[in-house]
Image: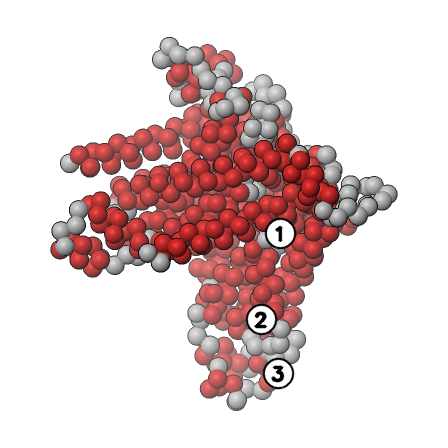
């Protein structure tokens, strides 16, 4: 660019409005349907805003203070955090196990990896439906096998104690292949000399994992935990299909809560406040992750 | 030896857990209601029937849902590819005032969760009279910050000498973008297209919110609402799920490497 720039007329280098013309469609859409709505959402959350009402009175931080007195919201926040922490922890362990077991480039490993990866592209709606009926005590395979073994079938999704762990299990089922695939890519990027050096030093399998593999995998781990936590914090489809937040709000999440308030009860301002709490939680959790991974760097 | 057998036990349990639910659902779409209740411990049908696949057309506006899904995911993906690559062309290959600001605006939209904008966008569409319309379903999703970002990264790796040569030959920006840059960007196009199409095809909350009328819903929304009622014929629901999964499954087996490439850099919902 720098060498030839002088020989090309300025107008052709795109100094004028050409650049903006190329960006116009995207910027228009992002402006109208993302940037302006972000501001608008904050504005709604500071009002007692209801769709179709004649007046939308200013409420200051009322919606936010009301949220923390709302039992359903407190459950939604707690459930969201539990789902996120539990899913991420289990996924990293299971995904790392699968990645280590299946990292070699032979046909068998590749085919098995494809099988594990497949649930990643199935919609959460289908995954939720599949597991809802699979776990149904009357028609489901799990109940059928339980009965065949002479035991009483468990009503997983109707139980206040078991519903949330079950949702977490299905979330793990859906994402294990994703974590595995990303970690396999990370493992392949580790230079072979590192392992040779370790084996010359007489390091055992576990020691190699601890001192070579895991430290080298740290950037990949950060990426994959980031993706999984953000996905889990925004969990909606799975819960909507499997339990609708029940029984008694025991699987309600922040997004099912904001859907319920915003699009079933039409409390626009209140739902907007929930969406900002979600945003803040996403920012805090991401910052915490960066912190954890950087803290390890200092070791 | 012990670690080796432990490894295969671990992988084997994983395979069982991954495959059984999928096989059970696909098989369930060929089962009668009596079979389903009578042989709960069975993975496959005792008697095969196609009534689930017939019922899908009778009990749901299935053709309409399918058409809506194809239009929504298809048209949105095509528009996204065009708009994102145009925007990225300006950001990666042109120099002009305000370029950095524009790029930062794009990045901001990448960081804020989609749910924050869901309510205000719903209100906007309500005021435009765009709820339950294709333009309401498609236009707000017709560009993605992630796509812009990915295209920008890709375009920056293409040598600048190529456009300089084209310019000396008298080509304008539109021509350089369309004839020089885009043909070189096929891997980026494939990745953005696949990820976008899959995400849109599978999306639930957006079509659920924007289309309240059941003739304007997409497959996931239609099936979720159907599953939310009292289900009297499970084979119909399973058949619907299998049909909605089919296009993605075909694409997955044909273009798995693009999925892997895209997903391991960006993730999927």
Residue B141's tag is 1
Q: Secondary structure at mark 2?
A: helix
Q: Position of residue A86 (x, y in %)?
A: 44, 37
B261 sits to left or right of A192: right
Residue bearing the label numbered 2 = B100
Q: Among all residues in the image, which is located at the extreme bottom?
A: A7
Q: Is residue B52 visible?
A: no
Q: Classify residue B57 by image quadrant.
A: top right
Placement of B258 over or under A93, stated as above or below? below
Q: Looking at the picture, do discs 3 and 1 lie on one chain?
A: no
Q: Nearer the viewer, residue B235 or A114?
A: A114
Which quadrant would the C terminus of chain A be assigned to in this image? bottom left
| Label 2 to label 3: alpha-carbon separation | 20 Å
Q: Secondary structure at mark 1?
A: helix
Q: Residues within 10 Å of mark 1 (few under 14, many from 20)?
A: many
Q: Classify residue A180 by image quadrant.
A: top left
Residue B124's tag is none
* Marked residue chain, label 3: A
**Is the residue under label 2 in contact with that under label 1 (CB below 8 Å)?**
no
* Marked residue chain, label 2: B
| Label 3 to label 1: alpha-carbon separation | 33 Å
Placement of A216 over or under B237, stated as above or below? below
Q: Is residue A30 visible?
A: yes
Residue bearing the label numbered 3 = A11
Q: Position of residue B91 (x, y in %)?
A: 55, 69
**Mark before the other along the chain sequence, 1 or 2:** 2
* Marked residue chain, label 1: B
Q: Residues within 10 Å of mark 2 (few under 14, many from 20)?
A: few
Residue at the spot 30% in from the left edge and 50% down from the top edge: A214
Q: Nearer the viewer, residue A233 or B216?
A: A233
Residue at the spot 23% in from the left edge and 34% down from the top edge: B6
């Amino acid at each position: 660019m720098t060498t030839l720039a002088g020989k090309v007329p300025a107008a052709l280098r795109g100094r004028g409005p050409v650049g903006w013309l190329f960006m116009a469609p995207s910027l228009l859409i992002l402006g109208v349907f993302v940037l302006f709505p972000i501001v608008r959402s904050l504005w709604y959350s500071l009002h007692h805003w209801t769709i179709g009402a004649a007046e939308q009175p200013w409420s200051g931080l009322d919606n936010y203070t009301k949220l923390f007195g709302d039992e359903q919201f407190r459950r939604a926040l707690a459930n969201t955090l539990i789902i996120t922490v539990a899913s991420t922890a289990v996924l990293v362990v299971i995904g790392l196990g699968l990645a280590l077991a299946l990292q070699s480039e032979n046909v068998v490993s590749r085919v098995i990896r494809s099988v594990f990866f497949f649930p990643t592209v199935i919609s959460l709606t289908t995954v939720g439906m599949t597991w809802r009926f699979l776990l149904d005590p009357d028609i489901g395979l799990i109940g059928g096998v339980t009965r065949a073994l002479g035991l009483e079938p468990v009503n997983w999704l109707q139980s206040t104690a078991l519903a949330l762990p079950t949702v977490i299990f299905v979330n793990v089922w859906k994402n294990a292949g994703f974590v595995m695939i990303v970690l396999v890519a990370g493992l392949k990027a580790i230079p072979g000399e590192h392992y040779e050096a370790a084996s010359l030093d007489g390091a055992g399998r576990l020691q190699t994992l601890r001192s070579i593999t895991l430290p080298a995998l740290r950037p990949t781990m950060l990426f994959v935990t980031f993706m999984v936590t953000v996905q889990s914090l925004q969990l909606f489809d799975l819960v909507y299909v499997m339990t609708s937040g029940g029984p008694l709000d025991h699987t309600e999440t922040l997004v099912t809560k904001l859907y319920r308030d915003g699009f079933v009860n039409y409390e626009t301002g209140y739902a907007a406040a929930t969406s900002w709490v979600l945003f803040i939680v996403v920012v805090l959790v991401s910052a915490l992750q960066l912190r954890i991974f950087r803290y390890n760097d200092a070791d | 030896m012990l670690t080796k057998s432990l490894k295969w036990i671990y992988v084997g349990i994983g395979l069982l857990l991954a495959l059984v639910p999928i096989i059970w659902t696909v098989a369930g779409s060929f089962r009668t209601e009596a079979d389903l209740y009578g042989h709960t411990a069975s993975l496959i049908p005792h008697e095969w029937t196609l009534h689930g696949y017939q019922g899908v057309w009778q009990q749901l506006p299935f053709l309409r849902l399918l058409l809506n899904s194809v239009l929504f995911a298809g048209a949105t993906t095509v528009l996204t590819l065009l708009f994102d690559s145009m925007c990225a062309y300006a950001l990666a290959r042109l120099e002009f005032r305000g370029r950095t600001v524009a790029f930062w605006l794009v990045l901001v939209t990448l960081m804020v969760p989609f749910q924050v904008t869901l309510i205000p966008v719903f209100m906007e569409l309500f005021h435009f009279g765009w709820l339950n319309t294709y333009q309401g379903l498609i236009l707000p999703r017709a560009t993605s910050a992630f796509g812009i970002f990915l295209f920008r990264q890709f375009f920056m790796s293409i040598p600048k000498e190529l456009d300089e040569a084209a310019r000396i030959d008298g080509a304008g920006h539109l021509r350089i973008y369309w004839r020089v840059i885009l043909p070189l960007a096929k891997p980026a196009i494939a990745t953005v297209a696949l990820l976008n199409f899959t995400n849109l095809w599978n999306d639930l909350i957006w079509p659920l919110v924007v289309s309240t009328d059941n003739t304007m819903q997409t497959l996931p929304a239609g099936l979720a609402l159907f599953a939310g009622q009292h289900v009297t014929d499970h084979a119909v629901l399973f058949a619907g799920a299998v049909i909605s999964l089919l296009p993605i499954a075909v694409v997955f087996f044909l273009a798995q490497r693009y999925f892997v490439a895209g997903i391991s850099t960006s993730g999927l919902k």
